[in-house]
Amino acid sequence: MSRIPLTPVESVTPTARDFMRRRGELNVFRLLAGAPKVFDGWTTMVDAQLDSHTFSPRLRELVILRIAHLRHCAYEIAQHTDLARDAGVSDAEISALSVEGPVPGLAEPESTVLAFVGELCVTGTVTQATFSAARAVLGEAALTELLLLVSLYYGLALVLNAAEPGIDDHVRLVTPS
């Protein structure tokens, strides 16, 4: 049971209702809709991240699941495991995302990106070598977008771990194909 009451879908703002119609009536959205002054703006960032073509769906889901495992966020793991599979991530790769240290078995640019994400999430920063390696494979604009993706899902993991909204039984996040 959620530590903060979930907002009934019929009570959310029109912008939030449209977002949930497109992305799913997930517990996380019903939780965050309880802060309507910021939720509508937050949904704009989520849409921008999920609709961006900077990263392939596969790389985006690898990043999200790596963050979820590093933050021990069962909700994000539940929501994004099937999305990762749909994006071409194997069960062995999904399992490897939960290891401590470097994620084994990935090719470039995935290994460099996940090394960057892992170091940032574990230490709160990255070394110059890690930063330079990520910039070399991504470029500056994509690296900046990666930082925003990490901030979105790392922060969301903290919220979900604190509020415990409960994992949705049958509803999954809807992302572009």
Image (cartoon, helix red, strand yellow):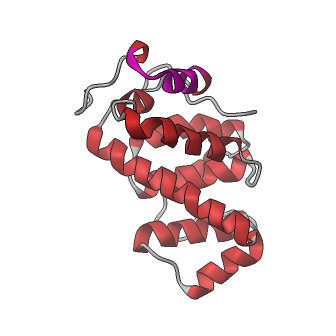
62 on left or right of 164: right
Q: Residue 71 sits in which quadrant?
A: bottom left
> Where is residue 139 shown, x and y percent of the image?
75, 72
Q: Is residue 42 visible?
A: yes
> Where is residue 175 shown, x and y percent of the image?
66, 33
Please tell me which residue lies in front, 150 or 94: 150
Question: What's the residue at 75%, 78% (across, down)?
Answer: 136
Characterize the magenta stretch by its predominant secondary structure: helix
Please tell me which residue lies in front, 57 or 94: 57
- The residue sitting at the top extreme is 10
Please tell me which residue lies in front, 124 or 81: 124
Relative vertical location of residue 16 with respect to residue 107 in this rendering, above or below: above
> Where is residue 87 shown, x and y percent of the image?
72, 41
Please tell me which residue lies in front, 22 or 73: 22
Looking at the rendering, the stretch of residues picked out in magenta corresponds to 11-21
Q: Is residue 85 magenta?
A: no
> Where is residue 141 shown, x and y percent of the image?
72, 66
